[in-house]
Amino acid sequence: MADRIKQIASHLNYPQGLLAGQVAIITGAAQGIGAECARLFANEGAKVVVSDIDAAKAQATVDKINANGGKAISVPGDLLKDEYIKELVKKAAEFGNGKIHIIVNNAGFTWDAVIHKMTDKQWETIIALHGTAPFKLIREAAPYFRVKDGEPRNIINISSTSGLHGNAGQLNYAMAKAGVVGLSKTIAKEWGPAFGVRANTIAFGHIETRLTANKEAGAFVEVDGQKVALGIPQKQNAQKTGGPVPFADIPLRRPGSATEAASAVLAIASPLSSYISGQTISVTGGRNC
């Protein structure tokens, strides 16, 4: 059997995996899209650093990966704290024997309100988490990307259709997610010529996660002791599914799964996308096309 496996592997373009030997930091990787990214990256040979504020869920993700033959570590913490970002990069580099190849800036949540009722706390928290934190992580990791060792380096920033087209009730989120498009394009132009770093944005539409589930399900995050409910009001969700044509605004007539979303991230991170940089890829089932 071992000989047969070796024979089959010899006919594959990437027998050890699309990301073999690469070290990837994935933020918000304890659940949802981030956890699926971690799983898929590990399946393709990457050494995965799971970053998340939820230590228990982050460790559970790592345990599953390692139990299935992958390589992963958990570095839990709060991306809004500068000391955590330094620790995350330091431990990732140690795990990678001095190298980091990929960053996926995926962490985040929504804290919605219409413009005239949005508080400074809502605005500042979402801008910091979705805009400032990715910048600070990339800046801290710069010595591991501004290198000339012939190995691939790429950064993927997660955006949303709210960032590309705006969305009522999400000015803070839309502002931050629009900003990461510029972040990716600037990295591509600054670090591409000399160091070959690729940087891209992936903008998701309706993906089934706790952010698009019914708010009444009770998912929440805490911000300075305040509970922030996650999800969409059930009545609003019902309007999408209960009409004559479910999900009428999506040509594929369904939301995407976390696995489908993560697969798009893997595709852009992989050598199959080696000439794609500075781009924004919409993963929406055709919505807003």
Image: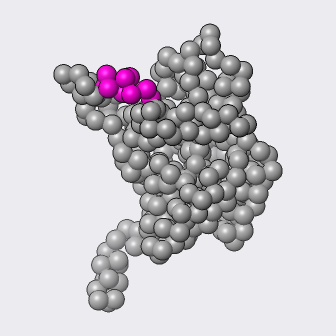
Q: Residue at x 48, y 45 (%)?
A: 276
Q: How is the image coloured?
A: one colour
Query: Residue 278 at x, y = what percent?
Result: 55, 38
Q: Residue at x 23, y 22 (%)?
A: 243
Query: Residue 272 at x, y = what percent?
Result: 42, 55
Query: Residue 153 at x, y = what percent?
Result: 60, 55
Q: How many marks?
A: 0
Query: Residue 40 at x, y = what percent?
Result: 44, 60
Q: Quadrant of the C terminus?
A: top left
| In this picture, residue 246 sits left or right of residue 37 | left
Part of the protein shown in magenta: 232-240
Confirm whether the magenta stretch covers residue 123: no
Q: Is residue 90 visible?
A: yes
- 192, 249: nearer the viewer: 249
- 35, 153: nearer the viewer: 35
- 229, 46: nearer the viewer: 229
Secondary structure character of the magenta stretch overall: helix
Q: Is residue 199 visible?
A: no
Q: Residue at x 36, y 45 (%)?
A: 257
